[in-house]
Image (cartoon, coloured by chain):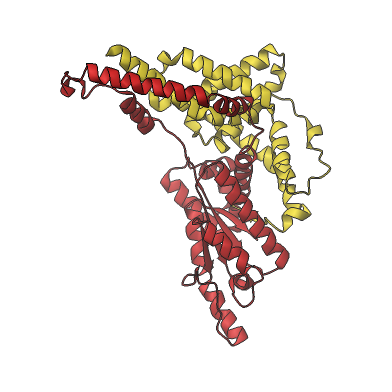
Amino acid sequence: MEIVKKLAASFCLKQEFAQRRNKLYQIAYSWCHDAALADDLVQETMYKAIKNRSKLREVATLDTWLYRILINCWHDYLRVSGRHVELFDVRDDRIRDHSDMYQKLQIVDRVRSSISSLPMNLREVVTLADFAGFSYAEIAKIVDVPIGTVMSRLFRARQNLKEQLLDMSNDEALQLKLRRVK
Amino acid sequence: MDNKQFTDEKLNMFIDGELDTAEANELHEAMLQDPQIRERVCQLKAVRELVGFAYQSPPRSNHDRRVRQDSGRNTFWKGIAASLLVCLGVIVGWSTHQYSPSVIAGTTTAKNVFSYYTEHAPVKHTGRNFILHLSTSDIGAVKAALDEADNLIASYKRSNTPLKIDIIANQRGIDVLRVDVSPYIDRIQKMVADNDSVSLFACERSIAKAKVREGRDIVVMPETVTNRTARELIPERLNDGWVYIKV
């Protein structure tokens, strides 16, 4: 019976991982902006999660645990690929240039470009908060920094994005749609 | 109330629901009185919404493509495997039927372990609520607003995320919901009919003013709620964390 219990628990946990796969992929993509790389990162995360599933003590922390693995895989990748400088303070303004930013379909691209221009540590925090919907405490666990750091990174990230994105509301196409959003 | 009293860090905490009740209430009060604070909160919320929206539909992963291909390819073998499992189940069931069910009852099965996980794991289904505030009947602006509503509905449907949109019209915006005036009646009617999540409100006060101005009854779409004012409806929803889009 013990074996059946273990098999069932293992099966269920794999199901849980699978259910979260898509969200993990979206977050990974928001960090690296590369579909193939995001796929690899999620694959590696899944592999590590299944391999180390016995280390998960509380099911309630499953989300935080999985995202922690994902961010570690991502940081490993950056280290190995020699792109660790980007972790902190590289800002690439070139990608902000869009010839057709007035078109509605470009809004998503514009936002993604603005996010990709953020230093990586800010990018991670802002996507975990605004896209994945984690609380400050959960983000602190995932990123492994104090809550105060999460708050200041979030503040800087949003400040930066606000400056980059606010002039979107001056775009002719957008003026008709959005004057103020709360 | 001093605008500078509320730092951007605090406003961030507010929109993220990280302030305690007393602080959040204080900020609500300040927002009602000070348009600058309201504007700052609006801007931060807009940024948050844009980030949330930007990655709803990233390029499809290779894993997805493989799963789709494999699911078609493997249907036959899955059928065979399912049949074999059914046979195996019958054989095992028949050969063990003499054992008392009470011995088995209460043990961990795949089903109850699964329900344990689904009940305890914090799966997030963060639905969003939007106010689409129409205060103008300008054709271009209204068209853009309805396009925006359609996009929101489609986008949230794609991601299986709950969505609610309240279209609240006041001032000249009520013309959009008037059956004898609006060029968009059919479109709005279809939107409401196709989506339970869309509700229509016309400001009671604006209707009364229009009635005086035009000297005739103002007839709006039957689905429209007309017994509240926009001034009541909008702050209520803002306090509940709705996203506000003003046309």
Front-most of B8 and A77?
A77
Asked if B34 appears above or below B230 in the picture, the reply is above
What colour is chain A? yellow
Asked whether residue B29 appears in the rendered view, the answer is no
Rendered-image quadrant of the N terminus of chain B: bottom right
Residue at image point 55% right, 64% down: B168
Front-most of A158 and B101?
B101
Residue at image point 47% right, 51% down: B26
Residue B209 placement (x, y as % from top left): 57, 80
Residue B80 placement (x, y as % from top left): 45, 22
Asked if A142 appears above or below B8 in the picture, the reply is above
What colour is chain B? red
Front-most of B114 and A101?
B114
Asked whether residue B194 appears in the rendered view, the answer is yes
Rendered-image quadrant of the C terminus of chain B: bottom right
Asked if B201 appears above or below B82 in the picture, the reply is below
Count of labels in the image: 0
Looking at this view, name the residue that lies furthest to the right: A99
Q: Quadrant of residue B130?
A: bottom right
Asked if A171 appears above or below B86 in the picture, the reply is below
Residue B75 placement (x, y as % from top left): 52, 27
Looking at this view, name the residue that lies furthest to the bottom: B215
Q: Quadrant of residue B91?
A: top left
Residue A102 placement (x, y as % from top left): 78, 49
